[in-house]
Amino acid sequence: MQEGIAGAGMFVALVDRGFFDSFKEANALAHHLREAHEHNDSVLIRDLAARHDRPFGMTASPQEIEQTTVGALEQAVAALEAKAPEDLPAYRQLVLEVAQSVAEAAKGVSPQENQALDRAALGSSG
């Protein structure tokens, strides 16, 4: 589940790379996860946001990150549907909010970032 959250942010950040933009986007990802940890109503979401690890190195290609992220999102949705369906809307919302905040962090949302957001939404809408 954590891999899907972080992956959505990383995928959006890497599809439109820029040196200074990467710092802004990484900061947006960390800030959003910190806010979710401190203020989300769902205990599961607070826990997932607190234990954030970076699942990808900066050398991973956008295609690798997309494939891994979409798979992780699909597995997370299936697990939540089976075991904690009440947490599924909060998880979906967090994934999309993280990806959106990263996309908006530098120079607005590019066409490539819009495509990445659409892909993250497909993975999280299972």
Image (spheres, rainbow, N blue to C red):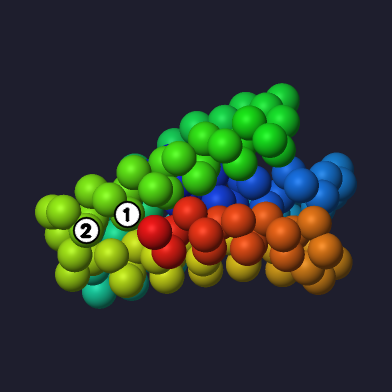
* Residue shown at 83% from the left, 64% from the top: 110
Give the secondary structure at mark 2: helix
Side of 53 relative to 16 (left or right): left
* On-image quarter of the C terminus: bottom left
Side of 66 relative to 24 (left or right): left
The answer to whether one can see residue 45 in this image is: yes
Q: Which amino acid type corresponds to the residue marked 2 in the rendered image?
A: Glu
* Residue shown at 50% from the left, 45% from the top: 70
Q: Residues within 10 Å of mark 2 (few under 14, many from 20)?
A: some
Image x and y of residue 33, in percent: 45, 58
Which residue, given by chain and number where applicable, does mark 2 sit on? 81
Which residue, given by chain and number where applicable, does mark 1 sit on? 77
**Quarter where residue 119 is shown:** bottom right
View extreme (left): residue: 83
Q: Residues within 10 Å of mark 1 (few under 14, many from 20)?
A: many
Label count reads 2
Q: Front-most of 94 and 32?
A: 94
Give the secondary structure at mark 1: helix
* Residue shown at 81% from the left, 70% from the top: 108
Q: Which amino acid type corresponds to the residue marked 1 in the rendered image?
A: Val
Q: Is residue 103 above or below residue 22?
A: below
**Cβ–Cβ below 8 Å for labels 1 and 2?**
yes
**Quarter where residue 91 is shown:** bottom left
Q: Which mark is residue 112?
A: none
Q: Front-most of 82 and 19?
A: 82
Side of 26 relative to 96 (left or right): right
Image x and y of residue 102, in percent: 65, 60
How far separated are the C-alphas under marks 1 and 2? 6 Å
* Residue shown at 25% from the left, 74% from the top: 41
The answer to whether one can see residue 98 in this image is: no
